[in-house]
DNA sequence: TTATAAACGAGACGGTACGTCGTGTCTTGTA
DNA sequence: TACAAGACACGACGTACCGTCTCGTTTATAA
């Protein structure tokens, strides 16, 4: 996938246009570094060295570290609520478990943690993250809205707010390094959102 | 607020023991920097300079940046679920709004964002944050458990999981810089946790 | 003498190669600091600040403080035994006086003292100094050897040893801050080496 | 010689007077550090720790690092020109060899190198060193003067200057870490001072 | 006989400098 | 004009010592 090994056949310019091989190698290197050595070892410098790219090439195409991270995160195939089995509890539980599993796998969890961390320092990164989150919230929300349409969800509720609640639970697990979750626990968490905790008398 | 300005009466050692004045000045400086210039400008170097302390003095008492940040965060008076008005919906809504307001106020939100960011990079910081979160989760959870005892909450529910769900919602708002929340929205969020979103037929 | 003051026209990289302007500014700054504030105030940090250079730039090109000092010392025009007036006594006396005068002037004495001091602490510096000294010894020695060739110097003597003797005298004056020397005293010192002190009966 | 091992019987104050055991332990520690780890590892901090003494105790009795070093150097038994065998060449050669051997042995060479290095940085140290050197010069000079009295040395010669010449040779060897010297080389060096290098026709 | 005064160990203090790392900008020569 | 390479100014990192300070303890001497 990356041809870093061959010293004689180095990658170079393909003229006055963006070289996709460089872009690919950079994102690949970023992903690998995150996956292998964790967020603490991630730096533009390290990415450039690993990708055998010049630093300016990176800065030419990504304005800052966060943009590169978000881009790298996007390349990973993000799990969706592809359910609609009719059983909302089961669908959401599966979604939650797949999301955490996705974050555990490869380096995608590390990448996303880095994105969030970077966003706390960098204003632009924060906005990019918020935009990404809004998009995801809308996506998951629309699926809940679909459930609402088929009267699996109460008419009054704000689907995006519910989506945000579920996301928040996932985030807090990611950010405190507690991604392992049993099916029971995931189901229990989903049940809170679906059924609430209030006693009915 | 801080009386560091007096040049003649500088702070010095009080013997072979920790000088509380230094400790205080350092935490104060850390808090002020976060509040005034934001997480991006926070550095041990800046804290030392502002607190008129030597860098080694900081490293002597706090092993890393995250420890200092967490310590500074602890000094802020954290809102609790001091409710028990009998109306759980109202108590939790008030708690949620107070928490976000607390984070908006002063620099405490900036501090906590920095802690979380730091925890993504530094292993030790991550553990410290997880420990702190566990404590908070237990605290909030115990209050939900009390509600369970007086049969306001269903018996099968895991109170700490519910607490984590609420915390996650707050975190995601903090981390994406969306701390402003209306009473209605807060109430709606709490309602999701209390009553769930599932339609009952 | 240095035009570093202009803020808009700062010195920057000239590509993937050493920038001679930086090199020059650094050596200049080092020399000035030694000359103006003495060896005690010399530090890489101070040099970097004065030269408006980054510390890493200094460490990139000079492995340690001593290397920088020796380099700065080399830039000063070192007096040579340019004599050969036929009168060896006069030539050596003049050389000795010029050497001490050279050390008195500007900062070159301070620089060389710093080099020697550094060499006592740092192994690499010691070797560098020894190499430099060997070169100088050989140089001065070869001139004495020339005198030997024209039979001004006894055939049996080791010219480099005599050179070292003269250097040692100069060093001990430098290191104990007694660089002022009268023509008579210099002549007397040289006479010891030329004629010895033993009575002949 | 030092009782650092016994944990229960630590050294403490003996009332309002200087504790000779502390003084001894400090000098001993200083000497050992120089001897074992070299001038680069010498620091007041290290001496205090090794001597199990407090830093103020050191600073109470020695105004600066150089004073401590000089004191430690004085404790070593310095070789003298104890000759007067009638053969000045032999006496001076033996003195020179003993001096270099003395510096090679134990840590005394390292100590003296440190003293000289310190003197290049610290004004007070420089004066102390100059005073010490003057004393030594006078001492060695007076012995040459004695030779002068018995007409082994020419009447016009300044004995102290000759002494300084010999010292300079020794210093330059010490400072460039070339203390090993053969009997022949030493004799040759001494011969330069005794007989000079000028050819006599 | 007691109180004082000074020296002791310990170690924290405000600092300075160290040598390393990463940032984002710049310029080179090559394709 | 994009590229790999890497130098540049900048500034934070965490560490080592500096020389000063105060603590609580110990003990010889003065009152």
Image (cartoon, coloured by chain):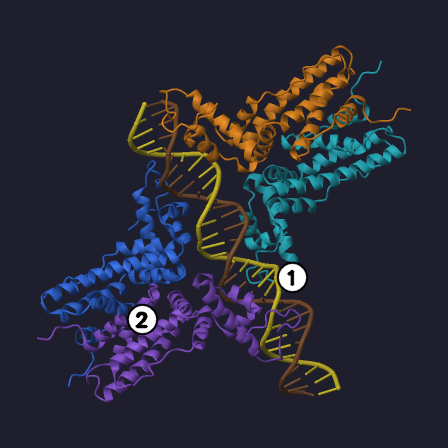
Chain colours: A orange, B cyan, C blue, D purple, E yellow, F brown
Q: Quadrant of residue D188?
A: bottom left
Does B164 sit left or right of A15 as displayed? right
Residue C118 visible to the viewer: yes
- Please give the name of the residue rendered at 48% of the width and 29% of the height, measured from the top-left corner: A63
Q: Distance between the residues labelled 1 and 2?
A: 49 Å
Q: Do the residues labelled 1 and 2 touch (CB within 8 Å)?
A: no
Chain holding disc 1: B
Which residue is the site of mark 1?
B17
- Please give the name of the residue rendered at 43% of the width and 32% of the height, measured from the top-left corner: A55
Image coords of residue A47 (percent x, y): 48, 32
Query: Quick check: C56 above or below B86?
Result: below
* Of residues D89 and D71, the one drawn nearer to the viewer in this rendering: D89
Q: What element carries label 1?
A: loop
Does D40 sit left or right of B4 as displayed? left
Image coords of residue D201 (percent x, y): 8, 75
In the displayed orientation, state which residue is furthest to the top.
A150
Residue C3 visible to the viewer: no
Chain holding disc 2: D
- Please give the name of the residue rendered at 55% of the width and 53% of the height, measured from the top-left corner: B55
Mark carried by residue D170: 2
């Amino acid at each position: 996938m990356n041809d870093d090994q061959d010293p004689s056949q180095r990658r170079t310019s393909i003229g006055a246009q963006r070289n996709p091989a460089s872009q690919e190698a950079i994102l690949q290197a970023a992903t690998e570094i995150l996956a292998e050595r964790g967020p603490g070892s991630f730096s533009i410098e390290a990415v450039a060295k690993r990708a055998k790219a010049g630093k300016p090439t990176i800065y030419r195409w990504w304005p800052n570290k966060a943009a590169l991270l978000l881009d790298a995160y996007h390349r990973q195939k993000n799990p969706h609520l592809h359910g609609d089995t009719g059983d909302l509890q089961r669908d959401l539980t599966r979604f939650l478990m797949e999301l955490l599993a996705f974050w555990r796998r490869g380096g995608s969890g590390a990448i996303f943690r880095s994105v969030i961390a970077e966003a706390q320092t960098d204003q632009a990164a924060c906005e990019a993250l918020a935009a990404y989150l809004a998009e995801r919230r809308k996506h998951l929300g629309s699926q809940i809205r679909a459930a609402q349409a088929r009267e699996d969800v109460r008419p009054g509720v704000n689907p995006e707010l519910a989506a945000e609640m579920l996301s928040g639970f996932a985030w807090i697990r990611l950010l405190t390094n507690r991604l392992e979750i049993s099916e029971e626990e995931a189901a229990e968490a989903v049940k809170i959102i679906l059924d609430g905790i209030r006693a009915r008398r």
